[in-house]
């Protein structure tokens, strides 16, 4: 009886190793790793008055001022829910900061701060993928809001490293994560060497 259990266990182990090796040789299923989802982040969306160079630069100045103003209120939050409350409680203040940034530049455009669920396409911020979907977002609409927009992840604070940069986020190129195991790679190499010797 015990011999049968040992043999069965050994056969299962050998079968598992064979399946693992075959999957490794034929290609392991690759999966995309998603950095965030709609429930654990909040986005910032700034829309310019127009596409003129000046209005686009003005949009970035408003962005920078709003990011500097929101950093202290968001940096101590440990969840999207507490960040959500901080933004809601300070929405008028955030709008006033944006308006002051416009006035400092000599423009009296109206500015509207909105907060709620907004639709966004896929975006990559560095090596982090933020998939397409509906996200909580702080949206600032400058003037008529007919210009190109700028967005980033406000919480967790991923925008703050971009202060001083005026580069639009790059389009997403889907990447795949490939899991490799050294032992399997070595077994594959040995198998190829044996085939080459025959």
Image (cartoon, rainbow, N blue to C red):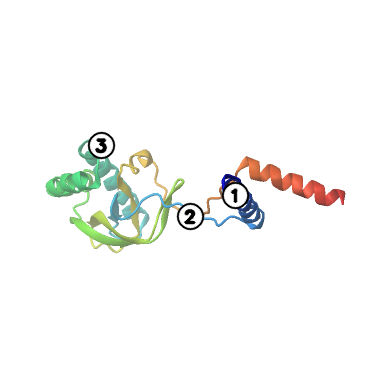
What residue is drawn where x is 57% and y is 45%? Answer: 2
What residue is drawn where x is 25% and y is 55%? Answer: 136
Query: What residue would you read off at disc 2?
Result: 32
Q: Is disc 3 placed on a helix, strand or loop?
A: helix
Q: Position of residue 25 (x, y in %)?
A: 67, 54
Please state which of residues 60 and 180 is positioned toward the viewer in this rendering: 180
Q: Earlier in the sequence, mark 2 or mark 3?
A: 2
Cα gap from disc 1 to disc 3, whole angstroms: 61 Å
Query: What residue would you read off at disc 1?
Result: 4
Q: Residues within 10 Å of mark 1 (few under 14, many from 20)?
A: few
Please state which of residues 194 and 3 is positioned toward the viewer in this rendering: 3
Report the residue that reaches farthest toward the front: 1
Q: Earlier in the sequence, mark 1 or mark 2?
A: 1
Q: Which mark lies nearer to you, 2 or 3?
A: 2
Q: Which picture quadrant has residue 67?
A: top left
Cα gap from disc 2 to disc 3, whole angstroms: 29 Å
In the picture, the disc for residue 75 is: 3
Q: Is residue 86 above or below residue 142?
A: above
Q: Position of residue 165 (x, y in %)?
A: 40, 42
Would you say 77 lies left or right of 182 here? left
């Amino acid at each position: 009886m015990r011999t049968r259990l040992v043999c069965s266990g050994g056969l299962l182990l050998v079968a598992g190793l064979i399946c693992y090796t075959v999957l490794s040789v034929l290609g392991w299923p690759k999966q995309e790793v998603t950095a965030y989802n709609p429930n654990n982040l909040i986005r910032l969306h700034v829309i310019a008055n127009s596409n003129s160079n000046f209005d686009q630069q003005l949009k970035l100045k408003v962005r920078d001022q709003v990011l500097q103003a929101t950093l202290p209120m968001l940096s101590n939050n440990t969840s999207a829910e507490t960040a959500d409350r901080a933004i809601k409680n300070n929405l008028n203040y955030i709008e006033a900061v944006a308006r002051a940034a416009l006035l400092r530049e000599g423009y009296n455009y109206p500015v509207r701060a909105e907060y709620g669920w907004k639709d966004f396409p896929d975006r990559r911020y560095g090596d982090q993928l933020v998939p397409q979907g509906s996200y909580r977002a702080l949206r600032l609409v400058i003037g008529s809001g007919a210009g190109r927009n700028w967005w980033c992840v406000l919480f967790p604070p991923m925008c703050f490293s971009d202060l001083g940069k005026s580069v639009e986020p790059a389009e997403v190129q889907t990447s795949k994560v490939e899991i490799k195991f050294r032992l399997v790679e070595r077994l594959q190499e040995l198998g190829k060497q044996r085939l080459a010797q025959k």
